[in-house]
Image (cartoon, grey):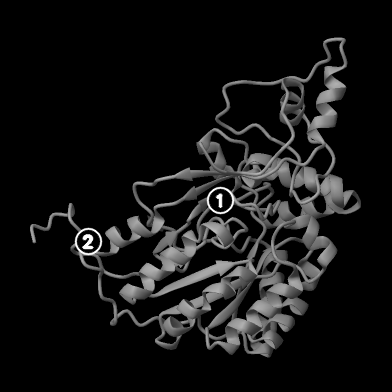
């Protein structure tokens, strides 16, 4: 049952078939209008006209921006382990599946395939909320033998996307971590993180919290197309300022770097973040896993057709001639001369701006597990 459902236009077989076969024009507030079929789909759809004008009707309906639906899910566990050597944390918490921010380049889009939903339009309009996240976290960190590790919130989908304003699942998670004095980091594009400074700042003062704000571009018009429901670039800079004033170690993520699109802004973004109070930075080049590849290429043709071929040629140059490279060690940085030059630019700019400091080191010695609750093996 929908936990929250915004009104949306009625669907029709013609509209559904059209969206599954061919992307329509851009939808206001959405990263893509394409309900691209996922890689596990067993059914194929083909748009056709039955002579009664249903195809034209379907196209018109498909051009109407759908509302966002949020579904409640009670999960069995909330902590996910990480075995990737190129990611700087051991555990992650993602309170939501799917993300209304609608970033067209999001590497998490293919995860909606596991839900039998489209990594395209469904990913940003059908959000799953893990409403018992705080309860599951409390159980996990109170278990015998649990030792605190590097924990990140929002590594896959943004923990502060719009629905968090009402559901407050992320805040509940942080409340559990704060009570247990368990260190954590957050990565987000949303200014809503400022709401939880009453929890984050005291943890930061004891070397137990840090926040990383992702800034892809300083160009508001480009941001509205790339990441339509994320906070505006200037608003994210104000969030960095607010975090820094509160004493929270704050870094900036200039990710993903897309050749000839936001890549020319690299140094300017780092400068703006440093001026706002960021103390560290990292950057990841564009990744195009699974269904992200056709979605992103369709977006290029729609929004920057004059640069589309050039951008993809440079992406392939950094990916060994392929559209994507998923190997550890190269998937985040790319390979080849251009990737090396990009890395040198980043390193040089960070050194000049004082953003080359180590990421925040956490103090795990203050961790105190929550009391174990009935049903976890305790008799008294």
User: In terms of depth relative to the viewer, which is nearer, 176 or 187?
Assistant: 176
Q: Which residue shows up at 80% across the image and 38% down it?
A: 64
The reply to whether residue 182 is in sight is: no
**In which quadrant of the rendered image does the C terminus lie?**
bottom left
Label 2 crowding class (10 Å Cα cut-off): few <14, some 14-19, many 20+? some
Label 1 crowding class (10 Å Cα cut-off): few <14, some 14-19, many 20+? few
Residue placed farthest to the right in the image?
306
User: In terms of depth relative to the viewer, which is nearer, 232 or 340?
Assistant: 232
The correct choice, above or below, for 58 with respect to 251 in the image is above
Could you say where residue 257 lies in the image, as x and y percent from the top left? 70, 64
Q: Which of the two discs, 1 and 2, labels the residue nearer the N terminus?
A: 2
Could you say where residue 267 lies in the image, as x and y percent from the top left? 75, 78
The correct choice, above or below, for 233 with respect to 12 in the image is below
The correct choice, above or below, for 92 with respect to 320 in the image is below
Could you say where residue 12 lies in the image, as x and y percent from the top left? 73, 23
Task: Write down the residue under mark 1.
Answer: 326
Q: Which residue shows up at 57% across the image and 57% down it?
A: 331
Is 264 positioned to the left or the right of 167 in the image?
right
Camera-near label (1 vs 2) is: 2
Task: Write down the residue under mark 2.
Answer: 143
Helix, strand or loop status at disc 2 = loop
Whole-number angstrom distance, CA of label 1 to CA of label 2: 34 Å
Helix, strand or loop status at disc 1 = loop
């Amino acid at each position: 049952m929908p936990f929250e459902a915004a009104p949306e236009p009625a669907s029709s077989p013609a509209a559904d078939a059209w969206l599954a076969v061919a992307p329509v024009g851009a939808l206001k507030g959405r990263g893509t209008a394409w309900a691209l079929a996922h890689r596990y789909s067993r059914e194929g759809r083909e748009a056709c006209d039955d002579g009664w004008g249903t195809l034209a009707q379907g196209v018109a309906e498909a051009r109407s921006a759908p509302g966002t639906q949020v579904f409640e899910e009670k999960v069995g566990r909330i902590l996910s382990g990480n075995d990737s050597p190129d990611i700087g944390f051991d555990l992650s918490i993602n309170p939501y599946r799917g993300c209304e921010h609608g970033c067209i380049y999001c590497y998490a889009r293919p995860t909606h395939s596991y839900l039998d939903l489209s990594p395209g339009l469904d990913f940003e309009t059908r959000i799953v909320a893990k409403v018992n996240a705080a309860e599951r976290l409390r159980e996990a960190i109170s278990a015998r033998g649990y030792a605190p590790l590097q924990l990140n919130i929002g590594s896959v989908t943004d923990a502060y996307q719009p629905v968090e304003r009402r559901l407050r699942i992320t805040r509940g998670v942080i409340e559990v971590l704060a009570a247990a004095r368990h260190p954590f980091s957050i990565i987000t594009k949303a200014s809503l993180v400022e709401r939880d400074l009453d929890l984050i700042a005291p943890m930061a003062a004891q070397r137990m919290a840090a926040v990383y704000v992702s800034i892809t571009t300083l160009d508001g018009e480009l941001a509205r197309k790339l990441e339509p429901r994320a906070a505006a670039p200037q608003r994210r800079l104000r969030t960095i300022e607010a975090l820094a004033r509160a004493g929270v170690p704050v870094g900036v993520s200039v990710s993903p770097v897309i050749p000839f699109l936001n890549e020319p802004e690299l140094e300017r973004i780092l400068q703006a973040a440093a001026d706002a109070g960021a103390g560290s930075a990292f950057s990841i080049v564009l990744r195009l896993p699974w269904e992200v590849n056709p979605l992103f290429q369709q977006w290029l043709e729609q929004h920057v057709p004059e640069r589309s071929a050039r951008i993809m040629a440079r992406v392939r140059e950094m990916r060994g001639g392929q559209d994507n490279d998923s190997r550890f060690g190269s998937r985040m940085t790319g390979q080849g001369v251009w990737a090396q030059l990009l890395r040198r630019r980043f390193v040089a700019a960070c050194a000049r701006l004082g953003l080359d400091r180590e990421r925040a080191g956490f103090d795990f010695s203050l961790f105190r597990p929550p009391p174990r609750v009935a049903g976890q093996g305790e008799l008294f």
